[in-house]
Image (spheres, rainbow, N blue to C red):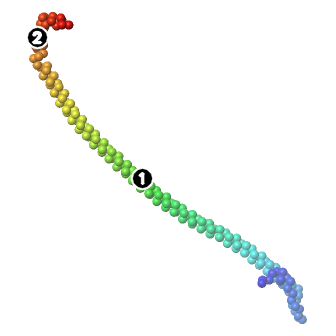
């Protein structure tokens, strides 16, 4: 067990015949007591300072550990975001390619349909033109016949007119 300043102060020595000078011993003990008390106070202060420093180091170690975990979590989150973005971009590209293929196929289908309609209209136009030409030629042939000349020369018979009016 360590000596306290009070133990030093209360220490009494036995006296011998030619012992030490009591005042010198007491003065020396007094000096040792003060120095020892200072050492103990300094030791106590250093222990408190060491405890505070250890607490701070422990706190900083805890902060460091938390920061490292946070960095790892942030890196994992960033990797997840990157991976998800990559997957999403691939899906968007696939969807765009599907839409583009669908649009191109629809356009080709419509172009074929329009081309077929154009061919059909050309055929109908040709048929119409031939029929119209035949109708006009038939009308021209009709106009060129002698029947028109005979109609112009036709003179009604008076007896036939009277008979026709009597019938009515």
Q: How far apart are labels 1 and 2 at the CA level? A: 88 Å
User: 52 or 26, which is in the foreground?
Assistant: 52
User: Position of 41 compared to 60: left or right?
Assistant: right
Which residue is depicted at the point 86% across and 83% down? 10
Which residue is label 1 attached to?
92
Give the x, y percent position of residue 55.
Answer: 68, 70
Which residue is depicted at the point 11% across and 11% down? 153
Secondary structure beneath label 2: helix
Which residue is label 2 attached to?
153
Asked if residue 70 is positioned above or below residue 139 in the image, the reply reads below
**Image quarter (top left, top right, bottom left or bottom right) of the C terminus:** top left
User: 101 or 150, which is in the foreground?
Assistant: 150
> Image quarter for residue 24?
bottom right
Query: In the image, which is nearer the foreground, mark 1 or mark 2?
Result: 2
Q: Are marks 1 and 2 in contact (CB under 8 Å)?
A: no
- Tag on residue 46? none
User: 168 or 2, which is in the foreground?
Assistant: 168
Asked if residue 65 is positioned above or below residue 4 in the image, the reply reads above
Asked if residue 140 is positioned above or below residue 7 in the image, the reply reads above
Give the x, y percent position of residue 68.
Answer: 57, 66
> Image quarter for residue 141?
top left
Count every numbered label the image shows and give the total.
Answer: 2
Secondary structure beneath label 1: helix
Give the x, y percent position of residue 109.
Answer: 30, 44
């Amino acid at each position: 067990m360590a000596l306290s300043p009070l133990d030093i102060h209360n220490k009494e020595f036995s006296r011998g015949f030619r012992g030490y000078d009591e005042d010198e011993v007491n003065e020396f003990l007094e000096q040792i007591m003060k120095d020892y008390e200072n050492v103990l106070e300094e030791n106590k202060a250093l222990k408190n300072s060491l405890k505070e420093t250890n607490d701070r180091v422990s706190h900083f170690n805890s902060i460091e550990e938390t920061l490292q975990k946070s960095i790892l979590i942030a890196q994992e989150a960033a990797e997840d975001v990157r991976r998800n973005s990559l997957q999403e971009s691939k899906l968007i590209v696939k969807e765009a390619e599907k839409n583009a293929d669908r649009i191109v196929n629809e356009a080709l289908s419509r172009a074929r349909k329009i081309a077929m309609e154009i061919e059909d209209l050309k055929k109908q136009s040709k048929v119409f033109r031939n029929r119209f030409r035949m109708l006009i030629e038939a009308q021209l042939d009709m106009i060129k016949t002698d029947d028109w000349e005979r109609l112009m020369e036709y003179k009604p018979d008076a007896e036939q007119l009277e008979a026709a009016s009597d019938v009515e």
